[in-house]
Amino acid sequence: MNRPLPFDPIARAAELWEDRIGPSGTMAAVTGIMRVQQIIQSAVDGALKPHRLTFARYEALVLLTFARRSALPMRVMGERLQLHPTSVTNIVDRLEKDGLVKRVPHPTDRRTTLVEITEEGRVRRAVATEAVTAIDFGLVGLTDKQTEQLTELLTKVRKATGDFVD
């Protein structure tokens, strides 16, 4: 990790933006979000690496754990994870190679294959969950109330861009 800077580079950029371009509120907010995303991604990757998982693979295991029958069609996984079908296929291929999921025939639709979490996948998901929750998913420095407010604000942006509908 780099040494902390003796100043906030985003605040400095916002000042320069104001002086040379115009209002800097949105630029500073977006730049801050992007930087926090880097910080969180690094922390989560570090917590998951010893468990030989990426965040995308971890999310897939969690999704399968939440499924009523611990199995879902890949199409549904893609919808819920908001990923392109090719990405879901790659994630499932890696998880299957590692013995964490298996592909099984759908009981009523021969055209559909289900992805089912294995017992080894359940164990790996559980220990990985301990690792990411131990670091609060890398989101540090906020109270519980502030975390709730942040979630509400980000949800408004996601909804406004059509990420989901109520």
Image (cartoon, rainbow, N blue to C red):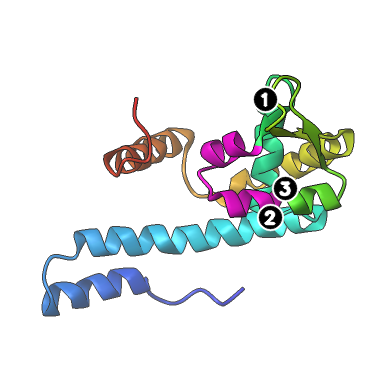
In this figure, what is the number of numbered marks?
A: 3
Q: Amino acid at mark 3?
A: Val
For numbered disc 3, what is the local secondary structure?
A: helix
Which residue is denoted by mark 1 in the rendering? 67
Q: Earlier in the sequence, mark 1 or mark 3?
A: 1
Say which label, 1 or 2, has the lower sequence index. Answer: 1
Residue at image location 60% in from the left, 54% down from the top = 86
In 3D space, how far apart are the residues under numbered discs 2 and 3 (Cα atoms)? Answer: 5 Å
Q: Is residue 94 left or right of residue 75?
A: right
x%, y% of residue 29? 30, 58
> What residue would you read off at disc 2?
90
- Residue corresponding to mark 3: 92
Is disc 2 in contact with disc 3, using a CB cutoff of under 8 Å? yes
- Residue located 75% across and 40% down the image: 130
Tell me if residue 90 comes above or below residue 108 in the rendering: below
User: Mark 2: few, some, or many residues within 10 Å (few <14, many ≥20)?
Assistant: few
Residue 5: percent from left, percent from top = 46, 76
Overall secondary structure of the magenta stretch? helix
Which residue: 51% across, 73% down?
4
For the view shown, which residue lies furthest in the front direction?
A: 110
Left or right position of 132 against 31: right
Q: Amino acid at mark 2?
A: Asn
Q: Which residues make up the magenta segment?
A: 74-91
Label 1, label 2: how many angstroms apart (C-alpha)?
20 Å
Q: Amino acid at mark 1?
A: Ala
**The one of 89 and 138 positioned closer to us in this rendering:** 89
Magenta stretch containing residue 76, yes or no?
yes
